[in-house]
Amino acid sequence: MLSLSGFGGQIFAGTLTTIELSILSLIVSFAIGLLGATAKLSKNRVLNIIGTIYTTLIRGIPDLVLMLLIFYSLQIWLNDFTDWLGDVQSYVDIEQINLDPFTSGVITLGFIYGAYFTETFRGAFMAVPRGQLEAAKSFGMKPGKIFRRILFPQMMRYALPGLANNWQVILKATALVYLIGLTDVIKACQNAGEATFRTFFFFCIAGLLYLAMTTVSNGILMLLERKYAVGVRRAVL
Amino acid sequence: MIYIIQNYWQPLLYSDGYEMTGLAMTLWLLVISCAIGFCLAIPLAIARNARNPAIWGPVWLYTFIFRGTPLLVQLLIIYTGIYSLDFVRHSPPLNDFFRQGINCTILAFALNTGAYTTEIFAGAIRDTNFGEVDAGRSLGMSQITLYRRIIIPGALRRALPVYSNEVILMLHSTTLAFTATVPDILKVTKDAYSATYDPFDAFGVAAILYLCISFTLIFTFRKAEQHFLAFLKP
């Protein structure tokens, strides 16, 4: 009853795809989030407006709609772009660039959750005491060094609870990529279920795998939170 | 985009001639699942804060499972999975219930938002000031009166900002309904996309509609916060 009927390998591969996808999208959205937060906090009006439009629009539109929008449009834009390049430089033979669901999944998830990370980082940047930055400046540190040595390590402590939340959301959002045709855990479990007529059992396996992933990452995030909270004195009641 | 709006405005907004579709369907899904989730969450949130592990344990398990798995998986289990079980197909009432995509969708959405709402309300109940409870007890309130008059109203007020987030996330989650063949906004725009092969315009229309609903919700909740949390104003 509880055997995987030989679908264990496929399901394992699907789980790995899901984990890879979520970690890569985490990295992309982390980077976009840092850029976005810097843009929203900068003194440049144009950057401010771009950052605000980005976060407001992306957070107002459901992620699935955005994903379908970007996934299908990205390919058309790329085709138009390669066509245009081909017209401009007819001597260069440019092949059509095909986006596979995995890459576009990473790009779209990263782009969407970048907006949520932007807001998390913005709040965290603002929570770092001003004096810290002024002290760093008075020591003659360059902006890059201030960011690396002072701002980032302290900001992370404030950002971690938000990041932990976002990570859980990303992990669960990777399930949506199944709808644009990626062979992830859900697809593997669906195949197995349809082949063996035990859909219920195999979808429950998918659920359990997700549950395991969220639980394990919860534990890791708690450890990280402890690491970044080193040197913070808590009130003892 | 004009073409899509001209040809699909009716199914996009309320009906395709046979049943409720589009915006009306999305709003109905949102309202009914949030309402069921809300009614589910209040007793569960009280149970979540009980001292007896036999009471809070099952509630914890429920929220743990439903918050730890993606809504899509829950929907697939309820819509495809349960219907594949033999005993469901052989019992007429269950068969009737689970054969309808909309029933499964509402069930999955309500259970999902119920789990998140339970944790939100449980947190708010936990944050109740001990002075309020002491004051209520000193007035001779029974446990039920205490909850009805003091703890629940205060907790709901405090939970409002977080709950508004949850409702907006629920709006975003309703887009999954098309996987269970429910004709919501996204389903109609997917049809429009299949007819025109113009993804940007088709999904763009959906995006604009969802954006409008999101902003309306945000505005309404801001007004509600101003009303219900007026005593917190500086």
Image: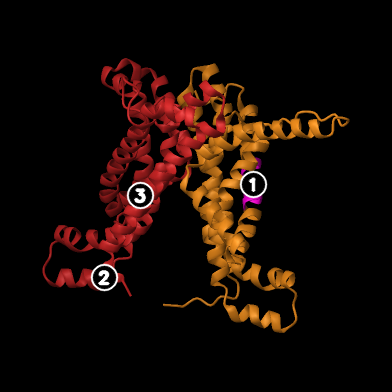
Query: Taking A186 as reference, is B61 above or below it?
Result: below
Q: Residue at x 34, y 32 (%)?
A: B25
Dot label at residue B231: 2
Q: Is residue B58 left or right of residue A189?
A: left
- Alpha-carbon distance for marks 2 and 1? 44 Å
Camera-near label (1 vs 3) is 3
Q: Are marks 2 and 1 in contact (CB under 8 Å)?
A: no
Q: Is residue B60 visible?
A: no
Q: Earlier in the sequence, mark 3 or mark 2?
A: 3
The part of the chain drawn in magenta is: A20-29
Chain designation of label 3: B
Camera-near label (2 vs 1) is 2
Camera-near label (3 vs 2) is 3
Dot label at residue B217: 3
Which residue carries the number 1 mark? A23
The red chain is: B
The chief SS type of the magenta part is: helix
The picture places residue A173, in percent across and down from the top left corner, at 53, 41
- Alpha-carbon distance for marks 3 and 2? 22 Å
What amino acid type should be assigned to the residue bearing mark 2? Phe
Instruction: Please state, as top left, top right, bottom left or bottom right, where the C terminus of chain B lies in the image.
Output: bottom left
Q: Residue at x 70, y 73 (%)?
A: A146
Q: Residue at x 35, y 54 (%)?
A: B219
